[in-house]
Image (tube, coloured by chain):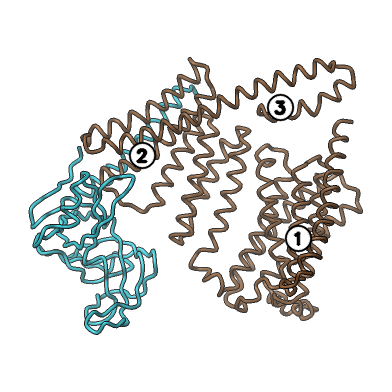
Chain colours: A brown, B cyan
Amino acid sequence: MNDRGFGKRLAQELPRWQKEGWVSAEGGQAILADLDARHQKLAWASSLALIGALLLGIGVITWFAAHWNEISKLMKLVLIFLALVASHVAHGFCQTRGALPKLAQGMAFLSVLFFGAAIMLIGQIYHIDAHFPDGIALWAAGGLLTAWLLGSQPAMVTSIALAALWTWTEQVEYRAMNWPLLGYLTLATVPLLRHDWKIAARGWGGLSILWMIGWHAQPWIGEVWESYAHIRLFALQVLGIAGCWALAQASEHPLARAVRGDFLLAALIGAFVFTFPDFASHHAVPAGEMAPWFAALVGAAALYAAGILRLVRASDLATKRLRIVIALSTCFALLLAFEVFPQGDFLRGIPQGDFLRGIGPRGGGLPALLWNALFLGVLYWIGDLGIRHGDRLMVNRAFIGFSIWMLARYFDTFWSLLDRALFFMAGGILLLAGGGWLERRRRALLHDIEERRQS
Amino acid sequence: MNLWLKITLLVVVQVAALAAMIADKQWTLNTGTPVVLQTEPVDPRSLFMGDYARFAYPISRLRLDGETALGGDKDFKQHDTLWVALKPDPDGAKAVSVHHQRSAIGPELLALKGEVQSLNENEWDRATNKSIPQRTLNVRYGIEQYYVQEGTGGEVERPRGGEKVSILVAIDARGKAGILAVLLDGRERYRESLF
């Protein structure tokens, strides 16, 4: 557990320990004050080391830029390599002889910056004008190796940020699938599984989602507003991400605990998008080869089913409530399947298939109505899950989701009255009342969680 | 693993990666076939890296239709990799045809690898002052920029009246090109070396 997490946990536990008589009130205060003072020093040391490393890095780069013409080619190379080696050696000294772990992290971060500067400067010295994302990929790989070998979270976070830039340029600017990123993500899990790096783990989750967003920029899927393929792909991605969330939610591993917040948020945003009645109505009617989409649906559904199954097995809910959860999860998957095949193409030849096919195509009111009901049900489940597990983040997410949903439906319903003062007055009162009620409920639930934890 | 051993491993791998960048470039320059290309200089400046000259070549714009159309394939998209068949000439190599595959280029011609930057469907006709249909590929070969000493870029970017800037490039067996020298009126102004 990191220093901040330990302090937070201690502050939550101390009142109970005092009540039990294990710790005196003065002793409890003294422990918290001491921890707070130490934490402040550590945070300052850490921030100063990172800022110092950043300033030194910028200074070295600008010095090179200012004296570039006066330095021979060989000397430039020697300086570049020396700067890189020096940052690594400084890390080693800080870690061993100096016993300065925070400064050592700053040096690891600096070495990643130096490696990037080395790539750019060698590119300039030798007039290397290659495919631009390749340089960023090499930089990210160097950062990953640094994080791996030196056990440095700042290096890992920098490497993930560079990998995000790499995949963005490759997939969005060059419109090419960045398959090598899968290798990077796999390798990055090795240090993430070894260390409890929450920020880096969340970055890893965000990077995976960014990679999936990049699929929509590919030429094989067509232009965004012309092809229904985007809706299909989006629905499949939401299903797959929901499956990843369920798998992570059922696991107690620190990496799974860290990334599940990202996956939950992405799945909720995906479901929320489908609650809009006009979503996808301007897209062309789906056409083309169905088999690859069907295969992708089967794959995503298998991942989702595995996640829900693990979640259900690990659940301590009563059978009746568990059935509701299973029904909710099944409805979610079925509605997404209908988004993939809005005209129920895969139902041809099945008895009652014609009735089900009548629900589509997308753009009608019924799918949106079902999605809205389901979205509210999912939010309720998320909130309930958060309360039972004492997870404040999940409770907050459920309430934020509900507030955004309410706002969206309000504008959807009363948009035609936008030019009337009544719209603002009635809307303001409604939202104020609703918002106030929601906030009170949220606080009451969080208070309950706190009380249950202490009892 | 011991920390110092890890640091040694890290240094070795990172230095090897950087050395590989240099070695790859030098391999092109040392083993490639020298070819002269005429240029059409433009004038940028990199804030980070100081002066550099950006070159456009006649082979940077490849016409796919009309009277001056090149032979070979026609169906290219943005960011496609392409192969240009070059016929060396002391006055500047000429593009003969353009292909998706290298195997389509005969042994008597040089194969140069490039990437489609953009595809134009129309061209401005100065004679009639009208836009006319003309499919043209804008291609990048990785020899479009050259870093020069600060303050000297103007010589290359804006040559004095009558001076002609041409580039001596080396094209290796993989179709990769590298700038060997910058020529002003056929005389070497800048020459590449390892150190």
Identify the residue position indicated by label 2 in the image: B17
Q: CA distance from mark 1 to mark 2?
A: 50 Å
Q: As drawn, which residue projects farthest toward the front?
A: A421
Determine whether A249 is above or below B70 in the image: above
Identify the residue position indicated by label 1 in the image: A405
Could you tell me which quadrant the C terminus of chain A lies in? top right
Q: Position of residue A317 (x, y in %)?
A: 88, 47
* For residue A148, side relative to residue A236 (left or right): left
Q: Amino acid at mark 2?
A: Ala
Q: Position of residue A296 (x, y in %)?
A: 62, 63
Q: Amino acid at mark 3?
A: Phe
Check if mark 3 and mark 1 are on a common chain: yes
Determine whether B192 is above or below B118 in the image: above
Q: CA distance from mark 3 to mark 1?
A: 35 Å
Q: CA distance from mark 2 to mark 3?
A: 41 Å
Q: Amino acid at mark 1?
A: Trp
Check if mark 1 and mark 2 are on a common chain: no
When asked about the image quadrant of residue A236, the answer is: bottom right
* For residue A218, side relative to residue B38 (left or right): right
* Label placed on residue A6: 3
When asked about the image quadrant of residue B35, the answer is: bottom left
Asked whether the residues under the numbered discs 3 and 1 touch, taking CB atoms below 8 Å apart as contact, a structural biologist would say no
Q: Position of residue A66 (x, y in %)?
A: 29, 37
